[in-house]
Amino acid sequence: MVEGSGNAADAYYVISPTESEIYKAVRSWLMTILPSGMAVVQGQQNRNAAPRDPFAVMTIIGRERIATNGWTYDGESARTVTEQVQVTMQINLFGPASSNQMQVVTALWRDFEAVDFFQSLNIPIAPLTTSTTRQLGFETGERQYDDLWTVDLTMQVTLTVTHPQQFATSIPIQLIEVDTTYPPTE
């Protein structure tokens, strides 16, 4: 199933990995390093209450092309364009131990185990850098302050877009006798 917006172009182009697959991969990694039972959710979801502390929220906040496209042809009916993109995902950690948990996230993002983790998922993601961690004031619905630490994780994602392509696989050739078909006029 292709992630789509209901747009007719979504049925025409196949994008991989989808935004959903990127979220799922990063969530899986976070769940291996954060305390057991800690909720990890995607940000900007309507009609969903925040989980109980402690919890993490992931939000993709930027995409930037970092290389020139490459492409391949399947020789039958499609062309695949490959684009190297730097994706930035903001990670917010809520709860009383969020500063220590954020230290774990930033320390392990650039570790070889994170690289190996994403390779094992067969998702073309490679951790790049982290921003400076920041502590933000957060007031709950009950007008109480809660700990909130945030960081931006950057990753290289190899995106592919596959779309239909017409190919000429054969050319019909018909031989004709030129002098007979087009007699000389001289």
Image (cartoon, helix red, strand yellow):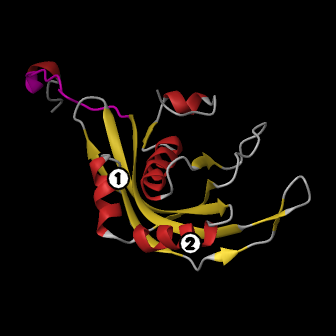
Residue 92 position in % (x across, y down): 64, 62
- At numbered mark 1, what does the secondary structure look like: helix, strand or loop? loop
The x, y position of residue 74, in whole percent, is 24, 36
Residue drawn at the location 11% of the way across and 26% of the way down = 178
Mark 2 nearby-residue class (10 Å; few <14, some 14–19, many ≥20): few
Which quadrant does the C terminus fall into? top left
Q: Is residue 169 magenta?
A: yes
Query: Considering only order in the chain, which callout, 2 or 1, is on the residue closer to the N terminus?
Result: 2
Q: Which amino acid is tagged 1? A: Pro
So how many labels did they put on this image?
2
> Furthest-right residue in view?
143
Check disc 1 and report the residue beneath it.
Answer: 124
Marks 1, 2: nearer the viewer: 2
Q: Locate residue 174, reporting x and y percent.
A: 13, 20
Task: Determine the image quadrant of residue 79.
Answer: top left
Residue at 46 percent across and 26 percent down: it is 1
From which residue to which does the magenta span run? 164-179
Task: Tell me if residue 17 comes above or below residue 166 in the rendering.
Answer: below
- Indicate the amino acid at tag 2: Asn
Q: Which residue is mark 2?
A: 100
- Few, some or many residues within 10 Å of mark 1 (<14, 14–19, 20+): some
Identify whether 78 is placed above or below 98: above
Q: Is residue 162 magenta?
A: no
Q: Quadrant of residue 110?
A: bottom left
Magenta: main secondary structure: loop
Q: Position of residue 68 (x, y in %)?
A: 38, 64
Viewer-closest of 132 and 149: 149
Q: Is residue 66 above or below residue 166?
A: below
Q: Of 7 and 131, which appears nearest the observer?
A: 131
Location of residue 146 by image quarter: bottom right
Q: Is residue 14 left or right of residue 7?
A: left
Residue at screen point 58% across, 69% down: 152
